[in-house]
Image (spheres, grey):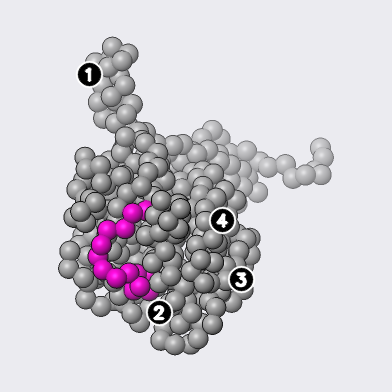
Amino acid sequence: MTARVGVVVFPGSNRDIDAVNALELAGAEPVRLWHEEASLGGVSAVILPGGFAYGDYLRAGVIARFSPVMRAVSAFAADGGLVLGICNGFQVLAEAGLVPGVLMRNPGLRFVAREISIVPERLDSPFTHLLDDRRPLRVPVAHGEGRFYAEAATLDALERDGQVLFRYAREDGSVAGGEEDRANPNGSVRAIAGVANATGNVAGLMPHPETAVEAILGSDDGLGIIRSLVESAGEAAAGGHRPASRAPVAAVGR
Amino acid sequence: MTTFRFAVNVLPRDGILDPQGRAVEQSLGHLDVRGVSGVRVGRRIELTVEAADETAARSTVERLAAELFSNPLIEQAAIETLGGASSAIAAGDGP
């Protein structure tokens, strides 16, 4: 059956168009959800797209966090529903405390918009299970506040519990270094590009898989992530095993 | 009800990388200024709160400071009381 996947639209969202396009390419039925809606309309997964929700005023993501639709998203997530926040959507999830850590201003204050490489840390999550291997994926980043940060003890726990989904990588697939390494576009600690919550059903990702879904766009490496989400959403809708039951299991070695 | 005026000063927590502060500090040489260090850049929010008393007003500001104005993972917020309290004049009230 076709999975219905919600795409939340905040004032200032702009990658919702790309998310809708990617979902259609992945065989899902996208459903736009306006930020003032208090219901998710029965969708089986939700994407919080990129953009500049509420102009990024105060702090990126913080005003969006308190919008009516986010109350519904929080309840959906607490019930095991699949939620993927991309870029600004990741910032919203982090501000809402639905995923660990925080996205800080890039070192050098640069807005970084270019193609980079990421490697999946896990191939068994609802967001990555259709990826074949740990081959690096070419996807774009476009953000001014993308430096993932958490305290060392939190980072250790995330790694131990398999909550790191993606890391920035060099083109040969080796994990990127610190802010001096161009492969790490924003100086994220431990080169973390994507994380999941403890139950594995909510994920935040700084790069944009949804804009790398067709060869004509320069890369279709992002489609595997969107297709994973859509298939997991379809399973959830069919009442199969809950998507979160895929995780947490042993993390793939670095 | 009485209104109370506050300011909330938000700064990066000690030890947290502050790229804005670093950029400002690096620019000081262009102004031929020497001997300045420890620059931190934050933001200041001023607001008026209507409440029964200052304690109640302050508790509203404390909640906003922690939940909205700052992210305690990376920022610290300090609350400042501004000016004196003033009695609110409800709409329609005449002398």
Q: Which labelled disc corresponds to residue A72?
A: none
Q: Position of residue A100 (x, y in %)?
A: 34, 61
Same chain letter for marks 1 and 2 = no
**Separation (CA) of disc 3 from disc 4:** 21 Å
The residue where tag 1 is placed is B35
10 Å crowding of disc 4: few (<14), some (14-19), many (20+): some
Residue A129 part of the magenta-drawn span: yes
Separation of disc 1 and disc 3 at Cα?
Answer: 57 Å
Q: Which residue is mark 2?
A: A243
Name the foreground residue: A75 vs A118: A118
Which chain is disc 3 placed on? A
3 and 2 marks on the same chain: yes
Seen at 55% across and 41% down, the residue is B47
Which residue extends farthest top?
A: B32
Disc 2 is placed on an element classified as: helix
Q: Depth check: give the residue in front, B73 or A233.
A: A233
Quadrant where the C terminus of chain B is found in the figure: top right
Q: Amino acid at mark 2?
A: Pro
Q: How far is the residue under mark 3 from the one under mark 2?
A: 21 Å
Q: Chain of mark 1?
A: B
* Residues at circles 1 and 3 in contact by the CB criterion of under 8 Å: no
Find residue B43 and report its image quarter.
Answer: top left
